[in-house]
Amino acid sequence: MNILYLLIPLGLLLLGIAVWGFMWAVHNGQFDDLEGPAHRILMDDDEPPSVDAPLKDKDK
Amino acid sequence: MSKDNQHCFHCDLPVPKGIDYSVNIDNVVRSMCCPGCKAVAQAIVDNGLTHYYQYRTDNNNLSRQLVPEELANLDLYDNPAIQKNFVRHSGESNKQAALILEGIVCAACVWLSERHVMQLPGVKSFQVNYSTHRAQVEWDEDQIKLSQILRAITEIGYRAHPLDPKRQEVLYRKERSQSIRRMAVAGFGAMQVMMLAVALYAGDYQGMDVNLERFFRWVSLLITTPVLLYSARPFFIGAWRDLKLRSLGMDVPVALAIAGAYAASFWGTATNSGEVYFDSVTMFTFFLLTGRYLEMMARQRAGRAAEELVKLIPAMAMRIVVNEQEIIAVSDLSEGDIILVKPGESIPADGFICKGTSSVDESLLTGESLPIRYKVGDRVIGGSVNIESALQLEVKAIGQNTVLASIQRLLERAQSEKPRLAKLADKVASRFVFAILLVALSVGLFWWSAGSADAFWIVISVLVVTCPCALSLATPTALTVATGQLTRLGILTTRGHALETLSKVTHMVFDKTGTLTEGKLKLVEVKILLQSNRDECLRIAASLEQFSEHPVAKSILLAYGKTNTHIVSEAQNSPGRGLKGKVNRETFFIGNSNFIREQTQISPEQIKDSRIQVLLATQTDVLAVFQFEDVLRTSSKQTISNLNELGIKTLILSGDRQATVDQLAQQLNISHAIGELSPQQKLDKLNELQSSGAVVAMVGDGINDAPVLSKAQVSIAMGQGTQIAQASADMILLSNDLVHLVDGLHMSRRMQAIIRQNLAWALVYNVIAIPLAAVGWVAPWMAAIGMSASSLLVVMNALRLSNGRLNNTRVNNAGVNRVGIDDPDSQHNQAKQNEGLDLDQRVVSE
């Protein structure tokens, strides 16, 4: 069971990283809009633009 | 979305007869209801964004707000003096701004506006937040101007205006991210500590290496400490505040239990004796924080909608310095400045008129429904709307010193004094808390005097097991879920107690104009006298009424419907009374009976007062009588019958004439209808009802309803109504669909039932658990598990509210707010909106 003395501090380290990552995400506004992205993923522009309505889209 | 050609493809409003606008969308010709929708749809097609029509789940109805005047105003936002209030520089020529987007109804709107704006050269980024309807835009000032971006947004039918970052939103964001952080720390901590706790509990039974046990305890302590210091801070702050105010809130036992359990566990860890309950500390904190987070989100949503409603004061003003005009931000105005207010603009600050004469619409502030004429030397109030001609003002008061600000302060005070039931709930809670503390103390004293070593742990057990967790979660969770559901239906709950009270309502009192009716006049009959030609009379009336902004004028113009009016010379408008003008060298008069009596030589006996009517006359004869009626809301009848079925008594209290009120009451099958009431009399009636034991809900929309709204136990304002009415209301019916009231009622009753179940459970649980804990049969870990299970049960029960069906939910959004088609010139919508409410007075009130 001595391995626990290594594994638990390791777990704490991971915990620290997880908390840090979460804080970073909050700071970056990842949690600002919890509804939009769920819809956004359903909308893409896979279809080729139709001929009579040319896209003025700039390349992104 | 409509498939037929009877409804506008873009906004789904019915296409009026004889109107022919269409746009080719993906090779199918779709009909449109108005030039606004056509322009928007065409812009969408031209930009290759027709996907919008596939993705959308709700219909856009904002295109009608596309007004040239407003487009011109957008240029003002390019002015650096104005920009400094809301624009940040993020690079050499890069700028950033936050915008409020109006008209976002579904995710497709987000997609559409993002795509459209991103196509503009010079726009670096444009991101719309679907939850808050706010957008962040970053652009290159060298390539594009802010006004062009705003114009592009307007082009596709949304309205954008800059958001002053000093306002609420920044605070909201901060509050939100802080509580997410607290929750995260508590959540991660709770998971880790729980893992260790399971090992420790197992160790109690199966035996465990002593060193390992000590190690686990220290690690748990290490994880719990930040949870206690960071995540649980709000509870300590709350408890401290409560104690300072000498009251006992829920925070006090929570803070005591958390601090006590932590301190004792710390002691146990340090001395390697007794038990440790770090798991209880972290889990408890996490659960409570989650509950509060949900509550906060609901509150913010309500607050945000309210912020959008308050747009009385314009952002900029035209200052005159030595005969030159300059645009400055209103916040930069100072006393003594001379400002120019053009017709149609809101007055930015209180001041005296130093040049010009005009009528001013103060309906938003004072409830005076008709514009008032002011001349040089008169004082005008900031937030009112200048109607006729340009005015120059000397600024007398700005910001917090204005009348508008003081009205807002009054309202805030009234609001803070209001919720009696909330106070009662607090009182009960504080007694409960006091009782818990007393029980815990006496139990502790008993065991201590009995010489038990476990006395302290028994006290903690009592505190944890009774911890008002279930109690304190029982109401807020149910409230939050119900509030969220209702918001989705378009019923905004702005006060916590509103739903609770709504479920107990016995009487529902309606205002007439603007509530049961749409508050818009419709020409229902043209009575022709003297064999004159009906069409000709209407044509003359329409020609004259072109010079008026009054709702009567609008409905006459609408009824006439054509554009070939006569040329009118020497037109003179007496606001609120009538007009006179020359058509084909003959002078005509149109107006209320008093106006005709004064202006013409017609003998008074020939002019009868009757319902809402306007007369057309020459110098000697009355030619025609125009009868108007206020249009009944489509949903009124169903709502009233549904309410009657639910056993709720419905009443009308109105300022309108008794005959009109009676007629309406009969139509709607309402037995008690009282008309001709002043606001004070309405209040008296309400008092009468209340003293006979009735719980009254008041539904209203106008300024004159504001006092009654704040006196009723629950008040509901119409979304179209005046801001002051909304400010004093507990709930706002954003959808303007009265049927949703019934949904609200159902929801509130279900919520009440769930709250009762929750409280009953909490009671049963506490009654069983407290004695067991007091006797010492419950170890703190059992108490913690019992508490968690109990609160979980309560939360789950409350969540049942979110998946129930609502009876009256209708997909029909198109019935709402159809200003656009009825009203070809919607330029002054904002300013005029409220004039329609009491307009009967133009004709009736003499």
Image (cartoon, helix red, strand yellow):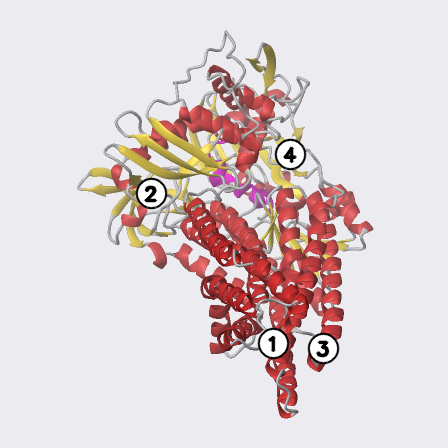
Q: Position of residue B710 (x, y in %)?
A: 58, 60
| Label 4 in the same subunit as label 3 | yes
Give the image quarter of residue B284. Answer: bottom right
Which secondary structure lies at badge 2? loop
- Dot 4 corresponds to which residue? B813
Q: Which comes sooner in the sequence, label 1 or label 4?
A: 1
Nearest the camera: B507 or B789?
B789
Chain label for disc 1: B
* Residue at (60, 75) in percent of width and height: B430
Give the CA distance from mark 3 to mark 1: 13 Å
Q: Position of residue B376 (x, y in %)?
A: 31, 48
Between disc 3 and disc 1, the foreground one is 3
Hey, what amino acid is under mark 4?
Asn
Which secondary structure lies at badge 3? loop
Label 3: few (<14), some (14–19) or many (≥20) C-alpha neighbours in 10 Å = some
User: Residue farthest to the bottom?
Assistant: B449
Hey, what amino acid is under mark 3?
Trp
Q: Quadrant of the N terminus of chain B?
A: top right
- Dot 2 corresponds to which residue? B86
- Dot 1 corresponds to which residue? B460
Residue B610 visible to the viewer: no
Q: Position of residue B588 (x, y in %)?
A: 51, 29
Hey, what amino acid is under mark 2?
Phe
| Label 3 in the same subunit as label 1 | yes
Q: Is residue B138 magenta?
A: no
B216 shown above or below B488 = below
Q: Which comes sooner in the sequence, label 3 or label 2?
A: 2
B422 shown above or below B638 = below
Residue A9 visible to the viewer: yes
Give the CA distance from mark 2 to mark 4: 34 Å
Q: Which residues are magenta?
A: B825-844
